[in-house]
Amino acid sequence: MLDGGINFLNLLRIVVDIALVWYVLYKLIMLIRGTKAIQLLKGIVVVLVVRVVSLILELQTIEWITRQAIYWGFLVIIILFQPELRRALEQLGRGNIFSRGTKSEEELLEESIGHIIQSCNYMAKRRIGALITIERETGVGEYSETGISINGELTHQLLTNIFTPNTPLHDGAVIIKGNEIIAAACYLPLSESPFISKELGTRHRAAMGVSEVTDAITIVVSEETGFISVTKNGELRRELSDNELRDYLRENLSTNLKAPDKKSWKWRGKKNG
């Protein structure tokens, strides 16, 4: 027996009871997150706080109003949010409400890399020029401010559409942070290194320039050749295949993923800079 007459079994039962309640509440909040129901939840919290304050200060009129709001509020909620409640019950019946609702960082990274690879491959085959900067530890906010704010989810459709010729945003760099496209049509600093090959154009010089002042990774799709290049820390690697680009992004964007064997790299281009 523990102090207060509560034995271990009763204590365990209480802990499990509280844990289950919190888990169900957490899943419900994750279910309604991003929907208009979350605003309703905030309103309910405000009403409850006002009621508690009215009880403490003995504000009879406000206490009566909040009591009526709580009394009839549940009926109003059922009527107004009938579609959301039905969807929640359907998910509960399928067991989806207790399944993992969010993706891990590794899954998000793989998804983002997949979108980038697919977009670069599409543009390379069609000789569509592209300049894509991926933020790492060093912020590139000063460069994203020179372009047009996007703040949209990274997808290969959106990324490809931005660089489609004769569209307002195709000229300039796209800046990506995590799985989000921050901005497009951004200006990057041009490298003044004399070691850059004369055959490389403005996109490659801009990619080298931003890599010299930040730790960002920048991908270049050549409009003339269709070759894919990548820069990081003042280093340029040219003519990457899809698999080489994928391995490079995995190696440099996450320390959680297993890095490829460096001996297996077969760069067809030469190192510049």
Image: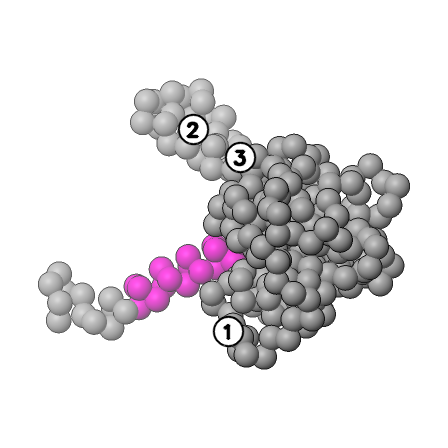
- Distance Cα–Cα, label 1 vs label 2: 53 Å
Mark toward the viewer: 2 or 3: 3
- Distance Cα–Cα, label 3 vs label 1: 46 Å
**In the rendered image, which quarter contains the N terminus?**
bottom left
Label 2 CA crowd tier, 10 Å (few <14, some 14–19, many 20+): some
Secondary structure at badge 2 equals: helix
Q: Are marks 2 and 3 in contact (CB under 8 Å)?
A: no
Is residue 73 highlighted in magenta?
no
Label 3 CA crowd tier, 10 Å (few <14, some 14–19, many 20+): few
Q: Position of residue 18 (x, y in %)?
A: 36, 60
User: Which residue is depicted at the point 24% across and 73% down?
Assistant: 9
Which disc is residue 43 wearing?
Answer: 3
Res. 268 image quadrant: bottom right
Q: Write the start and end of the magenta stretch as one range.
A: 13-36
Three-letter amino acid code at the position of disc 2: Val
Q: Which residue is disc 2 drawn over?
A: 50
User: Which residue is depicted at the point 65% across and 52% down?
Assistant: 196
Instruction: Indicate how the structure is coloured in the image.
Output: one colour
Q: Position of residue 7 (x, y in %)?
A: 18, 70
Q: Which residue is disc 1 drawn over?
A: 258
- Distance Cα–Cα, label 2 vs label 3: 11 Å
User: Which residue is depicted at the point 68% across and 38% down?
Assistant: 186
Q: Is residue 162 above or below residue 217?
A: above
Q: Are marks 1 and 2 in contact (CB under 8 Å)?
A: no
User: Which residue is depicted at the point 58% across and 79% down?
Assistant: 264
Q: Position of residue 104 (x, y in %)?
A: 53, 64
Residue 131 in view of the camera: no
